[in-house]
Amino acid sequence: MKIWLDDIRSAPEGWVHVRTAEEAIDLLGRTPDVEEISLDHDLGEPLDEFGSGQGVVNTLERWQAYGEDKFVPKKISIHSANPVGRKNMQAAIDSIERMRNDQV
């Protein structure tokens, strides 16, 4: 399964479209067969951590760090047009990758 998180853009064919960070986290937490997730940063209101794709990558980073019984997809992509949001999300994704490599 591929998850597309965006509140405005339509999902590409073959992707499951979710519109909120909460929906994405919920689906990731209960679906072990997610092969990829692509994230937008800005998701409308509220403009807090969980009103953005940043909340999703922060959650995935925590799951990876603490070995929580949750599934972290092998491929995490960003399709956001927000340059600052993209940079911050990429830093968390890079952290996830470093932890994966350290655990091997």
Image (spheres, helix red, strand yellow):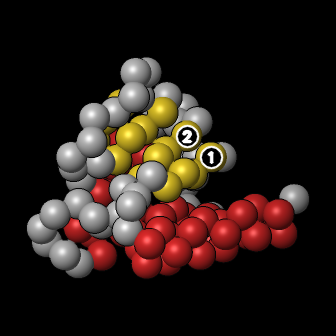
- Asked whether the beta carbons under mark 1 and mark 2 sit within 8 Å of each other, the answer is yes
Q: Residue furthest top?
A: 14
User: Is residue 43 positioned above or below 49 on the image?
Assistant: above
User: Is residue 100 positioned above or below 70 on the image?
Assistant: below
Q: Which residue: 40% across, 21% down?
A: 13
Rendering coords of residue 62 (x, y %) = 53, 71
Give the residue type that dot 2 points to: Glu
Q: CA distance from mark 1 to mark 2?
A: 5 Å
Give the residue type that dot 1 points to: Lys
For numbered disc 2, what is the local secondary structure? strand
- Density class for disc 2 (Cα within 10 Å; few <14, some 14-19, many ≥20) is some
Q: Which residue: 28% across, 64% down?
A: 42
Rendering coords of residue 7 (x, y %) = 21, 49
Instruction: Name the disc covering residue 89, or none.
Output: none
User: Is residue 5 positioned above or below 1 on the image?
Assistant: below
Position of 78 with respect to 91 (left or right) is left
Q: Which residue: 49% across, 55% down?
A: 78
Instruction: Name the disc covering residue 36, or none.
Output: 2
Residue position marked by numbered label 1 in the rendering = 75
For numbered disc 1, what is the local secondary structure? strand
Task: Place residue 27 in its image quadrant.
Answer: top left
Rendering coords of residue 34 (x, y %) = 52, 36
Task: Place residue 21 in its image quadrant.
Answer: bottom left
